[in-house]
Image (cartoon, rainbow, N blue to C red):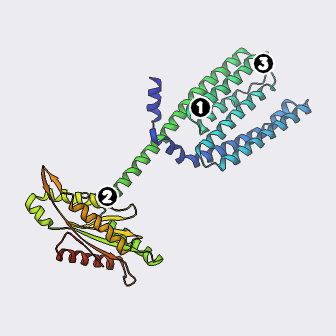
Amino acid sequence: MFQALFSQILTDLGELEGDYRAYHLKDDIAQSVLTLSIAGISILSMLIVDSLLYRDEPKLIMLMAIGRFGFVLITTVVMLAMSRATKVRVLDRLALGWIFFIIIYLVLLNFTRPANYLTSSFDIIIPFAIYLLSPLKISHNAVLAFGFSIGTLYVDYFFRVGTDPITLGVATAAQVIVHLLGFGSALQLQSYRRKSFKAYMEEKDAREMVAYLANIDPLTKSLTRRHLFSIAESEFLRYVRYHRPLSVLVIDADDFKNVNDSYGHHAGDIVLRSLSLVALEKKRAQDTFGRLGGEEFGLILPETNLEQARIVADRIQKTWEKSPVNLDGEMIHSTVSIGVAEANPSDQSFDDVLRRADRLMYKAKEAGRNRVVAE
């Protein structure tokens, strides 16, 4: 029950969990580096406290100074490693190692404090900082924060002789309160971040879907004329620049008006959709297929000369001829006429190639339909 409630509050991202962590990686690195910088400065500033506590023990002050500078050195190395991290798991391992190190360091440091010197205010800051500033999961942060509190309370209760019981009780209560506040605050912060990321991804998916639908002909599931021409112009520019072969097919359904008149427009729609599917199946991954209008389609074939393009056209023509459309048990037979043209140096734009392919398609119709004409 608690786990279900926890998941509901925290927003379960499911498969997006990895994307969520990767999306926030730079922010988590920047926050972690800033946190380590503050920790290093804070530890160095405590040298003033050490000089007051141990003013009669210069050797101990020296040892404390060495320990603090050692802490800063290790922290600096971890900071540099974090700033260069490019993967979430690397950042998590560095953060986990450093937090574990600082917990051990501070707990051991408490053994050196006088019996009447409690560090409650400082001890409260550490768990709260772990909850709010650590990039690790909340459950991992909770374990680390509890580990620190248990270690500090253990020192307070069993190694500080003569400490006032009321003071110890206040210190314990403060630890309990800071864990409740820290865990609650972390839960709220993480929940907000996760909900914001989920909303961002949903909006991004919606925008991509709108863009996709704007480029797809709803009837035939091929590209729209506008998007087909956009890609074709780019391919033509590539042809001009690199002099690589480029061919175009214009495919037109034969006697399509008769299909509509004999079987209805619904049947005509099914025939166009089926023809589009056949062409999409026969084209290569790098080819671009779209609807030019009505029952006419275009196929852009980059890196393809005229002879190779004719082979593709023959394949489409023969496959469609042998693929009647089943409409409520009645077989509708249809054929296509295809014109094939290859770009040549005299072409000024993609329109020149397309018009030539279109003329060849009409030649195929004049020659009896159901054939391919290329030149």
Spatial CA distance of label 3 from label 1 is: 28 Å
Horizontal arrangement in the rendering, residue 353 relative to residue 200 (left or right): left
Residue at 79% across / 21% down in the picture? 116
Horizontal arrangement in the rendering, residue 80 relative to residue 231 (left or right): right
Which mark lies nearer to you, 3 or 1?
1
Spatial CA distance of label 1 from label 2 is: 50 Å
Q: Residues within 10 Å of mark 2 (few under 14, many from 20)?
A: few
Q: Earlier in the sequence, mark 2 or mark 3?
A: 3
- Contact between labelled residues 3 and 2, with CB atoms less than 8 Å apart: no
Given residues 238 and 105, the one toward you in this image is 238
Residue at 38% across / 73% down in the picture? 233
Secondary structure under badge 2?
helix
Quarter holding residue 335: bottom left
Residue at 59% across / 29% down in the picture? 142
Q: Earlier in the sequence, mark 3 or mark 1?
A: 1
What residue is shown with label 1? 140
Whole-percent x, y for residue 160 in the image:
78, 19
The kind of residue on which mark 2 rests is: Glu
Q: Is residue 119 visible?
A: yes
What residue is shown with label 3? 159
Task: Tell me the tag on residue 281.
Answer: 2
Which mark lies nearer to you, 1 or 2?
2
